[in-house]
């Protein structure tokens, strides 16, 4: 098999490059290209009611063999929309669909596997996948390679026509009879509609599903009547208790707390911790702990942030309420506290995925980020990060906003040195998702490694007494000492998934697992 | 000269139809066509500052011979942006531009005439024009015919590529360093940015001019950083005292009050005056008086409106505050009261011109209107309305939202029978702007004429004691009796302007005045 090695050392099969017209990943620098955007086809209507009873009829009249359909994942594990729609599509005998959701959550896994087996779905592009679906794809169930794209790259691909959505099925917690809708009111409220706004704006046909029909005209209208073809009334769009992560729990794990404190030390001793700085923390117990440490440092140093970005959590909107953060730029909300705050706090601005992170833009929010804190399944001695495949090579993750937020001025990977018997810091990641060139600092519980390319940060941190600076090679060796050398994963020659960089070049190809 | 007669009886020269590929006006019914939209070309940037000092440099580097440039008219007679930009363009020696503003206000007239004379501007599309510019165009100054489009038709034309804006120059009362802006804060605040949102979304290059640079990120962002290429800091973008119509003055003219009361009588005795009805009143003393009468009728009958639409005035936002109107859907604000309310009242929703009135849409607000009250320079016995040319045939008006709002379920023309020695009700309007098929009722101080096609309304109003119903022929005769038959306007064969219907067909052609 002929391959071409890209700029992060990954072998990309020629057949992939030729068939799909891909270029290999070159640089994290986007440059200043001119990009022609695309636009949807509009089916003109002037009627006064788009509410229909039969989802079956909508599917029958609009979804045809070979089309691309999409969904959003704002309901996360509480989603009642995806399986309902897919059941109808599978039962209709429709074939060869491309599934192009903003991401796939676990509650959708078995249904996607079923649809692949039925021939309903033959192509998938997503931010990620896990569980039974990740297993199945890694073992070759899907004929064509999955294409993994970051949230910003999905926005780019939609805006530039690489993803052409024929029909978008979008669950919303409220809508009026013409399709004006937002994510803020109703039993299944989830806050920002950030990812779904792309589908609403660019799909040829937009189908809203809601359990909450409200008076016309419904405002604020994050999705507008000018974008919507059908409003389908359903019993329930989502399970409120499984939409968010629920109550905010700070980690009590001493290792996580230790890492969080070290991350905070890195931030406050960096040149970026100054009046009007900006940050993205992400979700998860460790991220919440960072927010708590950062809050205290901001108070102690009388420093306020201009904005916090990203997936938003309750501790972040608490900073907004406290006046420690001026604006929250919100592409999705991870918990009820954050979702509820979007309704009441005018300084929490809903942003779509393009504004959040499309690299081919007149400036996305991520371009303005000072500090981003990101996670890793693996990070290698070139600082390349894998958030997609497990230590056994099986797909079990998502690009999410990882590549996008890594464009920040200081990108910190926060991760334990090892997890159980598995090393986090490795000689070579099994899958490159985010190139090491955009990673600046790795914080583990045993030490902090700064990317040697960031001489400025190395110099700055050297002056800070007590910061445990080590080389990433040293961290890799220490991890290996603890858990030993893993057996090499055995793959076949077949490519089961492609990982695009945010600019649409190929950063890696994921192979089928040899059983 | 060969001509083709369209469905409102207007002769359209063959050469116009052939050269421009125009179809003639057929019907006010838009139907259900499929329409492919277009999208701009984006010049990618990831920098953190778009603020430039030199408007000259921006013009020099971006405006080229033959391009289409645009402006908005939200500053109305207080606009400081248009003349400043045009001066630089004229002095740069750039030629053959198409000028495509949302409309042209009087403060711009002389500069446009100067630019035409200099060869800078050779094509114009606008909602309207008046004063010295209207005179000049009517007397043949511009080589190519002006194209007049309604606000909804401009949105449609931009979305479908008939107007391709190369560079939009948009004045805003606030913006941050990357171009996030709204119309609500700052000395020159004007409220809704409704018309300008089209330019921001579809122009290849977007240049903001502002006198008020604010902290990043600026929210709410009606115009977003993802749409903006340059932010130019200027001394003043507008004269606050001339942006709005200033203090709200109710008319004391007995004739106007009489008409306003009759308009209200028509509304409240129509089948549309019921719980949850909707309306658009427009601006001007008579419209304000209607709002006052309507308010009392709503209180007396315990009826609330679901929404008020359009250009918004203080009396309309007062109804919102009072709870008599649930939502105000706001494409522009005519006075400071309305503009100020948009900032503070979350039920006053900013809408763009597409959502307001684009006919080729998945439903615009105007499609949902129950009642619209519109004006007329002339209305003929077929109910065709002219809001474009004066009794001497000279251009002195604007389509505005006239054709758009006339799609309401009951469109009322409110006008005096005569103005001075000039008849309003005439045998044939000199220019057809809005076809009579979409006009339902004419209210004058001497009687109310219902379009005979609306048999339902005729029957409903017959049952109302005291409503002075007359035929429109009778009104025309009474007008003629008062002012006599006017001399026929003398035109040359040359076409100086085209009036499109909102769907892009040709509803009329305006000829050069013979001196």
Image: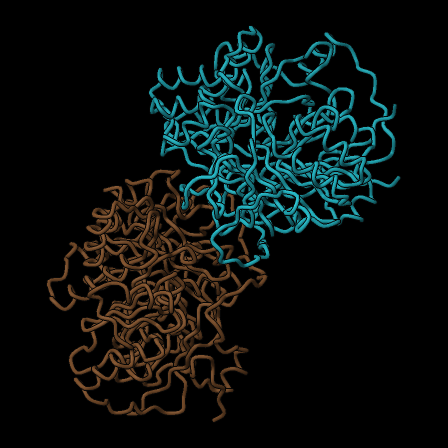
Chain colours: A brown, B cyan
- For residue B345, above or below residue B318: below
Say which quadrant the C terminus of chain A sits in.
Answer: bottom left
Observer-nearest residue: A515 or B85? B85
Observer-nearest residue: A473 or A385? A473
Snapshot quadrant of residue A152: bottom left
In the rendered structure, the answer to whether residue B81 lies left or right of residue A210 reads right
How far across and how far down the image is residue A387, in percent? 31, 73
How far across and how far down the image is residue A237, in percent? 28, 55
Observer-nearest residue: B210 or A23? B210
- Is any atom of residue B385 visible in this view? no
Identity of the residue drawn at 34% across and 49% down: A307
- For residue B463, above or below residue A7: above
How far across and how far down the image is residue A6, in percent? 47, 81
Identity of the residue drawn at 47% across and 87% down: A13
In the rendered structure, the answer to whether residue B222 lies left or right of residue B229 reads left
How far across and how far down the image is residue A162, in percent? 51, 68
Identity of the residue drawn at 75% across and 41% down: B123
In the rendered structure, the answer to whether residue B35 lies left or right of residue A237 reads right
- Is any atom of residue B299 visible in this view? yes
Give the residue furthest to the bottom: A1
- For residue A274, above or below residue A261: above
Snapshot quadrant of residue B36: bottom right
């Amino acid at each position: 098999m002929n391959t071409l090695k890209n700029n992060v050392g990954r072998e990309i099969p020629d057949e992939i490059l030729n068939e799909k017209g891909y270029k290999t990943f070159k640089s994290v620098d986007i440059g200043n290209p001119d990009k022609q955007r695309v636009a949807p086809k509009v089916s003109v209507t002037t009627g006064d009611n788009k509410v229909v009873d039969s989802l079956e009829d909508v599917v029958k009249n609009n979804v045809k063999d070979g089309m691309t359909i999409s969904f959003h994942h704002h309901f996360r594990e509480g989603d009642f929309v995806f399986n309902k729609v897919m059941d109808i599509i599978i039962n209709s005998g429709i074939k060869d669909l491309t599934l192009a959701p903003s991401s796939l959550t676990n509650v959708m896994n078995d249904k996607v596997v079923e649809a692949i087996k039925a021939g309903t779905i033959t192509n998938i592009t997503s931010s990620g996948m896990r569980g039974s679906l990740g297993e199945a794809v890694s073992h070759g169930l899907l004929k064509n390679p999955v294409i993994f794209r970051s949230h910003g790259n999905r926005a780019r691909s939609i805006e530039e026509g690489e993803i052409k959505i024929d029909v978008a099925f979008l669950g919303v917690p409220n809508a009026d009879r013409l399709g004006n809708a937002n994510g803020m009111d109703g039993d299944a409220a989830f806050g920002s509609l950030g990812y779904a706004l792309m589908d609403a704006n660019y799909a040829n046909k937009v189908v809203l599903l809601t359990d909450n029909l409200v008076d016309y005209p419904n405002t604020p209208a994050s999705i507008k009547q000018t974008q919507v073809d059908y409003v389908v009334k359903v019993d329930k769009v989502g399970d409120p208790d499984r939409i968010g992560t629920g109550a905010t729990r700070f980690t009590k794990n001493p290792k996580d707390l230790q890492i969080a404190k070290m991350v905070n030390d890195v931030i406050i001793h960096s040149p970026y911790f100054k009046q009007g700085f900006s940050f993205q923390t992400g979700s998860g117990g460790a991220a919440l702990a960072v927010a708590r440490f950062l809050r205290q440092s901001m108070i102690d140093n009388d420093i306020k942030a201009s904005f916090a970005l990203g997936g938003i959590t309750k501790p972040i909107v608490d900073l907004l309420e406290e006046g420690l953060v001026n604006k929250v730029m919100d592409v999705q909300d991870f918990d009820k506290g954050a979702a509820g705050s979007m309704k009441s706090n005018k300084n929490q601005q809903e942003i779509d995925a393009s504004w959040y992170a499309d690299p081919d833009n007149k400036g996305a929010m991520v371009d303005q980020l000072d500090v981003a804190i990101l996670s890793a399944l693996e990070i290698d001695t070139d600082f390349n990060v894998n958030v997609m495949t497990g230590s056994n090579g099986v797909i079990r993750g998502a690009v999410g906003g990882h590549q996008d937020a890594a464009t920040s001025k200081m990108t910190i990977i926060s991760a334990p040195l090892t997890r159980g018997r598995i090393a986090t810091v490795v000689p070579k990641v099994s899958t490159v998702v985010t190139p090491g060139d955009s990673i600046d600092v790795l914080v583990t519980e045993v030490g902090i490694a700064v990317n040697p390319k960031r001489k400025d940060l190395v110099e700055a941190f050297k002056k800070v007494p007590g910061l445990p600076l080590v080389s990433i090679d040293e961290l890799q060796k220490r991890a290996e000492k603890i858990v030993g050398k893993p057996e090499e994963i055995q793959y076949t020659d077949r490519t089961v998934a492609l990982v695009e960089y945010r600019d649409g070049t190929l950063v890696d190809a994921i192979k089928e697992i040899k059983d």
